[in-house]
Image: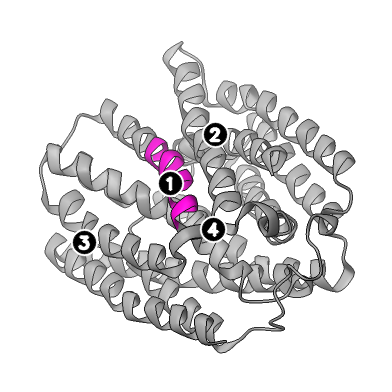
Amino acid sequence: MLLIGVVSMFSDMTHEGARGITGPFLGSLGASGLVVAVVAGGGELLGYVLRFVFGYVADRTGRYWPITAVGYTVQMVVVPLLALAGNWPVAAVLIVAERSGRAMRNPARDAMLAHATAELGRGWVFGVREALDAAGAMIGPLIVAGVLYLHGTYRGGFAVLAVPAVLTLLVLASAWRQYPHPSDLESAEAAPGRRGRPRAFWIYLTGMGLIAAAYADYPLIAYRFGKDHIVSDAWIPVLYAGAMATEALAALALGRLFDRWGMWTVAVTTLMTACFPPLVFLGGAALAVIGMVLWGLGMAAQESIVKAAITGMTDADHRASVFGLFDTGFGICWFAGSLALGALYDHSATSLVIFSVALQLAAIPLLVKVRHDIRSA
C-alpha cells in the first residue's frame, strides 16, 4: 500500500507539475486559446473514457501489473519529452498521450490496491494513497514555479520533472518485485461476493455523476479570482497548493471515518462541499480561502473514500472493469458539467452557484439510498 502511495506521490509531482504550465507553453508555441481548451478538455475526457477499456482488458487478461507499468511508463516518459517539443501539434500529442497513460494504469492499479483493503480497511488504504498523491500534486507545481522563479523556461520545468518521473518508475518496479501477486493479500473469505455491477453501483454512479457535473475545476475558480481581483496573481497558485495540502490531510481523516461510518461519510462530506460554490464565486478573499478548503475536502473524497466505496460493490475479478466504468461515467459528467459551469459563469456567478449547490444536494439522497441497499444486500 505504501509503495503504491509513494508511486502516486512521485507521479503526481511529475504530471501535476507539468499541467500547471502546459497552457502557457502551448501558447508560447503559437497555439490559440481554442486549441489550448480543446487539448486540455479533450485530453481529459479521452483519459476518462479510456479507463473502462483498460479496466476491462485488465480483468479479462489478469495482467494488472504489466498494464499498470505500461501506463505509468507512457505517462512518465512523455512529460520530460515536452521539453523537446518544437511546435504545438507535437506538444498536444504528448499532452494527450500523458492523459492516455494515466487512463491505462488507474483501473488496474486501483484493483490491485483494493486487495490490501481486506486487512487494513478500504477507507484507510485509499485515503493513504490519496494523501500521498495530493502531496505530490502540491510539490510538483512548486518545483516548476521554483524553476521559473530562477529565470528558467517552460522547457526547463519539463526537464526537471524527469527526476520524479524516474523515481516513479523505480519505486513501481520495487513494488512489482515485492508483491508480484497482490491478490495473495486478500483471502477468498474476505473478498466481496457480489458479482458484476449491482443496482447500488448504478445509483452510486448517478449520485457521483451529479457531484462531478457540479464540481468546478480550479482553472475556472482561478479565472474568477484573477478577473475580480480577489487575490493577487501570485497568490492564485498558492491557494491551489493550499487546497492540495487540505486534500492530503483530509484524505487520511476521511479514510478513517469511512471505515467506521461507511457511506454516511460520503453523504456528509457532500453536504459540506455544497457550501464551497458561494464562497469561492461570490465571496471576498477571506471567504474564498474557506471555500478552497472545502473544495480540497471534496477533491480528497472523490479520490479516496469514493473509490473505497466501489471496492465493496463487486468481487475481485471485476474490480478493474468497475473502477474503469465508474471513472468513465464520472469523467463524462465532469466534462459536461464543466461546459455548463463555464457558460453559466459567463451569464452570472449566481446562476453557477445555484446550479452547483443544487446538483450536490440532489446527490445526497442517492448516496443514502446506496447505503441502505448495501446494508440490505
Q: What's the mark number on residue 44?
A: 4
Q: Is residue 175 magenta?
A: no
- Residue extent of the magenta highlight: 244-257
Q: Counting residues from the N terminus, which is met first, the one under dot 3 or under dot 2? A: 2
Confirm whether residue 11 shows in the render. Answer: yes
Verify CB contact (< 8 Å) between mark 1 and mark 2.
no
Q: Is residue 253 magenta?
A: yes
Q: Is residue 31 left or right of residue 215?
A: right
Q: What's the mark number on residue 345?
A: 3
How many numbered discs? 4
What amino acid is found at the position of numbered circle 4 in the picture? Glu
Rendered residue at 80%/64% (across/down)? 187
Mark 1 Cα shell of 10 Å, populated few (<14), some (14-19), many (≥20): some
What amino acid is found at the position of numbered circle 3 in the picture? Tyr
Q: Is residue 207 left or right of residue 97?
A: left
Instruction: Quickly name the residue at label 1.
Output: 253
Q: Nearer the viewer, residue 262 or 4?
A: 262
